[in-house]
Amino acid sequence: MVRIHPGEPRLEPRLTVQSSTVTGRINAKALELLEQHPEGIRWTELLSKIRASDPTFHPKTVNGCVWKLVEKFPDKVYKPSKGLFRLLKYKSTEVDKP
C-alpha cells in the first residue's frame, strides 16, 4: 500500500513505483520520462536524462535499472525496436516500425 501525504505530487496509479529506494527512484524517473515521450525514448537518451535528474545516482545503478526495465515492468514498458523504450499504453494497433 502506498500512502500519499497531503500536498505530495501523485503519479498515475499504473505508474506507481516504490520510490523509497535508489532503484525505485530511478525506475520512477524512467517511467516518468517515458510518459513524457509517447513516441518512445532511446537507451542513451534515457540514461542521460535519468543521470541529469539526480547526480547522486551511480551510473552503473542507472544502467542496471534501465537494462531491466522491460523485465521488471512487462505490463508497462516494451521495446518496439532495439534500444528504444516505450510505454505499452502508447502501442498502436498497427505494427510498430523501427
Image: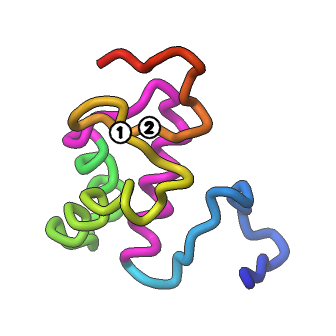
Q: Amino acid at mark 2?
A: Arg
**Where is residue 43, by image quadrant?**
top left
Q: Would you say the residues marked 2 and 1 are in contact, meaning their CB atoms lie under 8 Å apart?
A: yes
Residue at image mark 2: 86
Q: Residue furthest left?
A: 60
Q: With 43 as the anchor, is 13 left or right in this view?
A: right
Check disc 1: other Cα within 10 Å, few if <14, some if 14-19, many if 20+: some
Residue drawn at (29%, 53%) of the image: 52
Residue drawn at (22%, 67%) of the image: 64
Residue drawn at (19%, 41%) of the image: 44
Residue at image mark 1: 79
Q: Residue 98, position in %: x, y?
A: 29, 19
Q: Nearer the viewer, residue 37 or 84?
A: 84
In the image, which residues are magenta? 23-45
Q: Earlier in the sequence, mark 2 or mark 1?
A: 1
6 within the magenta span = no
User: Tag 1, which secondary structure?
Assistant: strand
Please determine whether, in this image, residue 95 is positioned above or below residue 48: above
